[in-house]
Image (cartoon, rainbow, N blue to C red):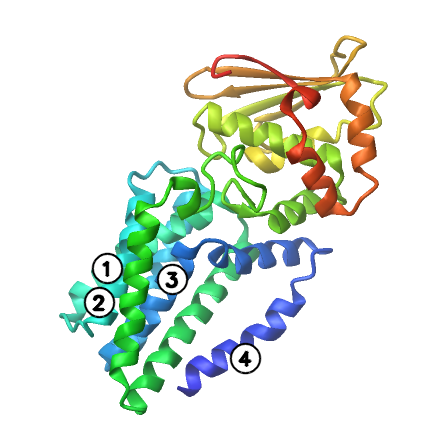
Amino acid sequence: MRFPLALLMALVPVAAAAHPGHAEGVGLFAGLAHPLSGPDHLLAMLAVGLWAALAGGRALWAYPATFVAAMLAGGLLGAGGAALAVIEPAILASVILLGAAAALTLRVPLGVAVAALAVFGVAHGYAHGLEGPGGAAYAAGFVLATAALHGAGIVAGLAVVRLQRLLIGRAAGFGVALAGVALALAPEAEAHGPGGGMQDDGALRGGRPVAEWVMLGTHVHGGFGSLIALGIRIGQDAVERLDAMPRQLEVTHRSNPEAPCPCVIDGLQVATRASLGTRTLVLSDAAPPADVFGIATIRHRETGAVLEYTIPMAAWAALRAANQGDPAARWSAVMDAPEASLFRRAGQGS
């Protein structure tokens, strides 16, 4: 049990170093948080460690090592915008099957077990890569968090083996499998976080905790105000309505010269992952009409579908008032406001 415990202790200073004032810290902290943001990820990671400990032998290191390696590969695919089918069903299946394997103390040929774990690892990693900000620090974060969860499962499994209380370990595996069934039967928004993010209660949006959105917005803009939150809300709305994957959207923003700053574009960048480097993000010099604060035009690069979001000057008073609170309050003020008070939507998918 010393190795998993040492691993968990090693994570403490790493997490403490993840200060949101630094780019690397933001990415690392987001990576550490992401596997904890959905019960499906959390339960599957624990189940891998529990099954490895109950199976014993080479499984003790091969199971978690295989899962982490496959997860990294899946993360690269997700960050690159690769299209993979049935990811969410595979994630939910992993919770049920890994929990059942632990409950049954299933012992199968090592090759069979690692093949199944590799498939599940790719699915979980793809979700991490697809939903996260990308970068080496972010990848390091979700690898460390996953390893820690595996370690926790291993510690628990080895403890019940040493204490000769296998029934407790098997009951824990059964509980994981049962929770997986409950997640599979739950509405999509409850299983892995909301898909598009505009119908939830704000605790999760686009599969991320609010704190993670705030950190990402701060990382891009240097601070988090109501205009960043508005850009995220519009960007997430477009992602959902255009059924877009990361980097499939082109974003053009026109800002009124009377506006304090074109800050909305930074929120749009966070939500859509459009960027200057991929030539998918443009801040146009063309001014909108005088009574318009800004206009965001978002186009799907493959389907050609376009949505246009018009922010009226009348919205600025409420947005300015929202900036009186802390970042979390600014987020809530924007996300809870009626859509019609902030923007008008037109175009395909509207």
C-alpha gap between disc 3 and disc 4: 21 Å
Q: Secondary structure at mark 4?
A: helix
Binning the other alpha carbons within 10 Å of mark 2 as few (below 14), some (14 to 19) or many (20 upward) gives: many
Q: Secondary structure at mark 2?
A: helix
Q: Nearer the viewer, mark 3 or mark 4?
A: 3
- Asked whether residue 276 appears in the rendered view, the answer is no
Task: Tell which of 330 and 187 is nearer to you.
Answer: 187
x 69%, y 42%: residue = 220
Amino acid type, callout 2 = Ala
Q: Earlier in the sequence, mark 3 or mark 1?
A: 3
User: What is the residue that sits farthest to the top in this orientation?
Assistant: 289
Residue bearing mark 2:
101
Amino acid type, callout 4 = Met
Residue bearing mark 4:
9
Q: Earlier in the sequence, mark 3 or mark 4?
A: 4
x 29%, y 77%: residue = 169
C-alpha gap between disc 2 and disc 4: 28 Å
Residue bearing mark 1:
97
Q: Position of residue 91 (x, y in %)?
A: 32, 51
x 45%, y 53%: residue = 38
Left or right of 234 in this view: 170? left
Q: Earlier in the sequence, mark 1 or mark 4?
A: 4
Binning the other alpha carbons within 10 Å of mark 1 as few (below 14), some (14 to 19) or many (20 upward) gives: many
Binning the other alpha carbons within 10 Å of mark 4 as few (below 14), some (14 to 19) or many (20 upward) gives: few
The answer to which image quadrant residue 273 occupies is top right
Residue bearing mark 3:
43
